[in-house]
Amino acid sequence: MSEDKKQLLHLVIGGELEDLKDVTFRNLDEVDIVGVYPSYEEAAKVWKQKAQMTVDNAHMRYFVVHLHRLLDPSES
C-alpha cells in the first residue's frame, strides 16, 4: 500500500438506544456489527444504507467508529 493512500479503518455499528439523548444500547446482544471498512467514505455509504433501512424505528441508530484513531491515537 502506498504512503499517500493509507488505510484508515472504520467500523459501522448500530442498534436500538435506550434514550435518544445518549449512546447506550438497549440490548448489547442485539447490536448490529455491520463491518470494518478501509476508508470513511466506504463506511459512510454503508452507514447511510443501514440508517435508511431502519428509518421507521426512532430508537435505532448506526454509527461510524474511527478505529484507526483507537489503534493509533497520534493519527487523525
Image (cartoon, rainbow, N blue to C red):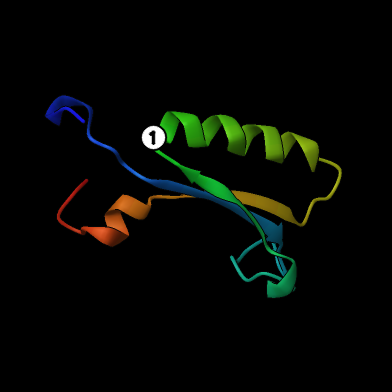
Q: Residues within 10 Å of mark 1 (few under 14, many from 20)?
A: some
Q: How many marks?
A: 1
| Position of 33 relative to 56 (above/below) | below
Q: SS of the residue at dot 1?
A: loop
**Which amino acid, by three-letter code, is at mark 1?**
Ser
Residue 27 x/y as whole percent:
74, 74
Q: Position of residue 7 (x, y in %)?
A: 28, 38
Residue at image mark 1 = 39
On the picture, is 4 further left or further right than 64? left
**Is residue 7 rendered to the left or right of residue 32?**
left
* In the image: residue 13, left or right of residue 2: right
* Residue at figure coordinates x 21%, y 31% from the top left: 1
Question: Which of the 4 quarters of the picture holds residue 15?
Answer: bottom right
Kindly give the residue lying farthest to the right in the view shown. Answer: 56
Residue depicted at 80% across the width and 51% down the height: 58
Rendered location of residue 19, percent (x, y): 71, 67
**Where in the figure is residue 56, as x and y percent of width and height?**
86, 43
Q: Can you say whether 30 is above or below 54 in the image?
A: below
Q: Quadrant of residue 21?
A: bottom right
Q: Quadrant of residue 5?
A: top left
Q: Considering depth in this image, is 50 or 22 the residue closer to the camera? A: 50
User: For the point 67% across and 69% down, which residue is it?
Assistant: 25
Q: Quadrant of the C terminus?
A: top left
Residue plotted at (13% across, 30% down): 3
Q: Residue furthest front?
A: 1
